[in-house]
């Protein structure tokens, strides 16, 4: 191919050399990417094609293709029709696929190609746009919008209604982590994520102080950037301890707390609460003697503080011991049976 031919036909470079059998391109796009944002190979083949077809007259890409001067026909061609159009005259045809895909067409093309009796055009599946990392989160937001609007149960839930489920899902996530079950962990992380998206969707309906999932995400993004000056700024942190020091200093400036106990949720399990308080006291460099008292509560408090100082999570340690106890119970029950 000479330079003049390539300049005269901007799509020539995208069309492969070979015998005159034509080319049939199935062009896919992602609904999670703004319409009109197509890859350069996609624009090349669209401009080079003799025909561009689309079965969906409401396809979101159509206004942008027409604005670019590309004629798109609304049609539902059969595999036979497309092969007969491409092969004899060495034509290029692009089929812009719908959101549901073109299973009937692809099945028909597979049958023709598999027969061994057909001269087939070059068949190509060309992605016109790709999902970015995190794109499936948009699907979750969209699904949650529909559920909130149409489900009789979900449409009337409040933050208070869902609070207990948030705790349950968080505990199930921790259980999957401690069990080392990655399949279960993947599912439980999804359940925890659902709670976040569900609460954000409820908040969006608040008549006085609404906020959306975008506001939630924006808030945590700002917080993360602000608390990681060694990543997004000019501060330096060579060790995990340096990072933790940055975090504590930044958080202290943000919160302007009058006590190290502020922000510690008192409703959390007792051992975790004791360990969190002990961690705050130790980090602040305070010398606070444990309260004097008799009974198992004070004994557990002392053990939790000691565990935290030694770098052990007392809540996780007790859960591990409890699981061993459960296994012993099961073994005893089996022996009795």
Image (cartoon, rainbow, N blue to C red):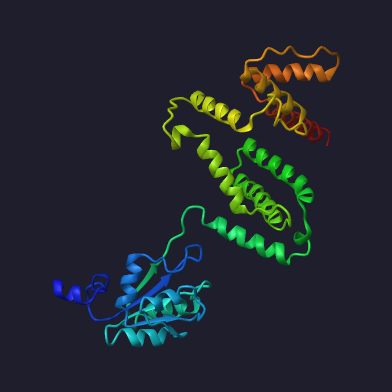
Q: Is residue 185 left or right of residue 34?
A: right
How far across and down, in percent of the image, does residue 158 sit? Answer: 77, 53
**Residue 217's spot in the image, x, y percent?**
58, 48
Which residue is more in the foreground, 285 or 162? Answer: 285
> From the viewer's perspective, is 98 left or right of 2?
right
Q: Is residue 88 left or right of residue 275?
A: left
The picture quadrant where one finds residue 27 is bottom left
Q: What residue sits 19% from the left and 73% below the top?
A: 7
In the picture shown, does residue 304 fall above or below 337? above
Q: Quadrant of the N terminus?
A: bottom left
Residue 194 is situated, as x and y percent measured from the top left of the image, at 66, 52
Residue 39 vs 296, above or below: the answer is below
Quarter of the picture holding the C terminus = top right
Q: Which residue sits furthest right?
A: 295
Total residue callouts: 0
From the top left corner, tell me how far across and down residue 60 is, in percent: 49, 73
Which residue appears at 60% of the width and 38% of the height? 180
Q: Is residue 329 left or right of residue 210?
A: right
| Camera-side residue of 315 and 68 | 68
What residue appears at the point 84 percent right and 33 percent down from the top-left corner?
336
Q: Nearer the viewer, residue 208 or 323?
A: 208
Camera-side residue: 126 or 208?
208
Q: Is residue 216 above or below residue 5?
A: above
Picture quarter containing residue 90? bottom left
For the point 41% across and 65% down, the residue is: 37
């Amino acid at each position: 191919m000479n330079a003049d031919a390539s300049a005269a036909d901007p799509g020539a470079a995208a069309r492969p050399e070979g015998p005159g059998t034509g080319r049939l391109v199935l062009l896919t796009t992602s609904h999670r990417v703004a319409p009109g944002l197509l890859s350069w190979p996609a624009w090349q083949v669209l401009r080079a094609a003799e025909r561009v077809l689309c079965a969906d007259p409401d396809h979101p890409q159509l206004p942008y293709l027409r604005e670019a001067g590309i004629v798109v026909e609304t049609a539902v061609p059969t595999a036979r029709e497309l092969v007969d159009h491409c092969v004899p005259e060495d034509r290029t045809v692009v089929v812009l696929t719908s959101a549901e895909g073109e299973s009937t067409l692809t099945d028909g093309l597979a049958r023709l190609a598999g027969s061994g009796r057909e001269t087939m055009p070059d068949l190509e599946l060309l992605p016109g746009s790709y999902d970015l990392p995190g794109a499936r989160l948009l699907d979750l937001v969209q699904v949650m919008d529909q559920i909130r609007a149409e489900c009789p149960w979900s449409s009337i839930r409040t933050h208070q209604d869902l609070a207990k489920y948030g705790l349950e899902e968080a505990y199930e996530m921790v259980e999957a982590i401690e069990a080392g079950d990655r399949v279960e962990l993947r599912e439980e992380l999804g359940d925890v994520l659902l709670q976040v998206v569900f609460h954000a969707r409820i908040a969006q309906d608040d008549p006085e102080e609404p906020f959306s999932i975008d506001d939630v995400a924006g808030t945590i993004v700002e917080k993360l950037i602000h608390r990681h000056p060694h990543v997004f700024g000019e501060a330096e942190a060579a060790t995990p301890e340096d990072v933790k020091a940055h975090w504590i200093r930044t958080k202290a400036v943000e919160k302007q707390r009058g006590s190290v106990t502020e922000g510690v949720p008192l409703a959390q399990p007792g051992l975790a609460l004791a360990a969190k308080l002990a961690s705050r006291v130790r980090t602040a460099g305070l010398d606070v003697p444990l309260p004097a008292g008799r009974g198992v509560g004070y004994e557990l408090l002392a053990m939790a503080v000691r565990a935290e100082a030694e770098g052990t999570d007392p809540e996780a340690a007790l859960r591990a011991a409890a699981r061993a106890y459960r296994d012993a119970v099961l073994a005893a029950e089996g022996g009795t049976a």
